[in-house]
Amino acid sequence: MSNILTLPPSRLEVMRHLEGYVDQMTNKFLRPIDNNWQPADLLPDASKLDFFDKVKDLQERARELSYDFWIVLIGDMITEEALPTYESWLMDVEGVHQGDKENPWSRWIRGWTAEENRHGDLLNKYLYLSGRVNMREVEISTQHLINDGVDIHTAKDPYRSFVYTSFQELATNLSHRRVALLAKKSGNTHLAKMCSFIAADENRHAGAYKHFVSRIFELDPSEMMLAFEDMMKKKIIMPAHYLRESGGKIGELFAHFSDAAQRTMVYTTHDYIDIMNSLIKEWNIDSMRELNDSAEKARDYIMGLPARLQRISERMKTPEIPYQFKWITV
Ligand SMILES: [Fe+2]
Ligand SMILES: [Fe+2]
């Protein structure tokens, strides 16, 4: 789909109608900044005398973790660090009005971005201190990802965009949670705590985006159903889809990153299907009424999709030998 998508005028009406509701959701789903956790709460304090002992301890614990584990954590960090891309995309969505500072939609997106910004910040500092990572290569990949941009096939459509963010926040919640679990299993409770904190944020954010879509289903069911179908047909593209390393081509690294995520069971094809099923349930797709003919067909397509993907995924195989990334040299 090109970025020029003609949207029905109902989009703007619905977005305007929901402004008061979004204000409430912003207060409900985002934390007050002064009490919120900050990366400094979870990292050694360089102004303290015990800083070097703490870093030594952090580096010793980091030795226990596997190659694939580091690849997943680095890839997760880079995609968190590409936050400027996601903020600029959401600010451009129809009905958001970023020029109006007081508009509830733009206020939500600023607040969401401000919370998200801590994720890349925390993981970046941890990876730097761990001593396991070639930071220059990681930073090159981050710069490339922001420079390349992503096309997640939503254009400026709020309906498609909120399907995407609902899905994406659930996926990141799951992957940060799994990374936390792996860290805990290897005795690294410190890293486990960091990833659990991030996962909890992602869960709150998913809650908000799922509510936005639920409200839109109440107001404009057929159009919302068609948007959901369209996003499912195209598949949800992870921002990591466009990852590359120095000297490489755009997107070349994604399959290798994804293989590491499958091998460590941090994020698998089954998780993709599980998330789809949970959204189908959350939005009561099965029992939705008052749909026009094409939306009825879209609903049938969505309901049949998890089983179809399940059959395809059973035939897929993940390579056993990891690719040698430039991100890790020691
Ligand atoms: Fe995040
Ligand atoms: Fe997120």
Image (tube, rainbow, N blue to C red):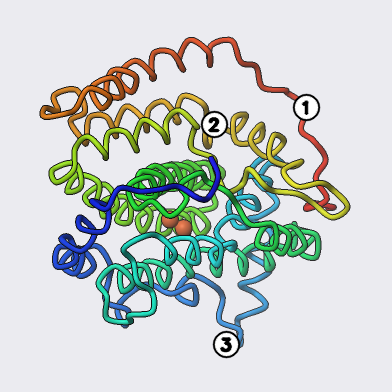
Secondary structure under badge 2? loop
Left or right: residue 172 versus residue 219 is right
Question: Does residue 302 lie above or below 10 as drawn?
Answer: above
Which of labels 1 and 3 is toward the front?
1
x then y, percent, for residue 311: 48, 10
> Disc 1 or 3, which lies upstream in sequence?
3
- At label 2, the amino acid type is Met
Q: Which residue is drawn at 64% across and 50% down?
A: 75
> How far apart, in angstroms, are the residues tagged by discs 2 and 1?
15 Å
Q: How crowded is mark 2: few (under 14 residues within 10 Å), some or many (20 or more)?
A: some
Per the rendering, the mark at residue 265 is 2
Secondary structure under badge 3? loop
- When asked about the image quadrant of residue 62, the answer is bottom right
Per the rendering, the mark at residue 48 is 3
Q: Residue at x 34, y 49 (%)?
A: 162
Identify the residue position indicated by label 1 in the image. Answer: 321
Left or right: residue 176 versus residue 49 is left
Q: Residues within 10 Å of mark 3 (few under 14, many from 20)?
A: few
Is disc 1's CB within 8 Å of ligand 1? no
> How far apart, in angstroms, are the residues tagged by discs 2 and 3?
38 Å
Q: Residues within 10 Å of mark 1 (few under 14, many from 20)?
A: few
Secondary structure under badge 1? loop
Question: Does residue 69 lie above or below 275 as drawn?
Answer: below
Ligand 2 rendered quadrant: bottom left
x then y, percent, for residue 247: 88, 52
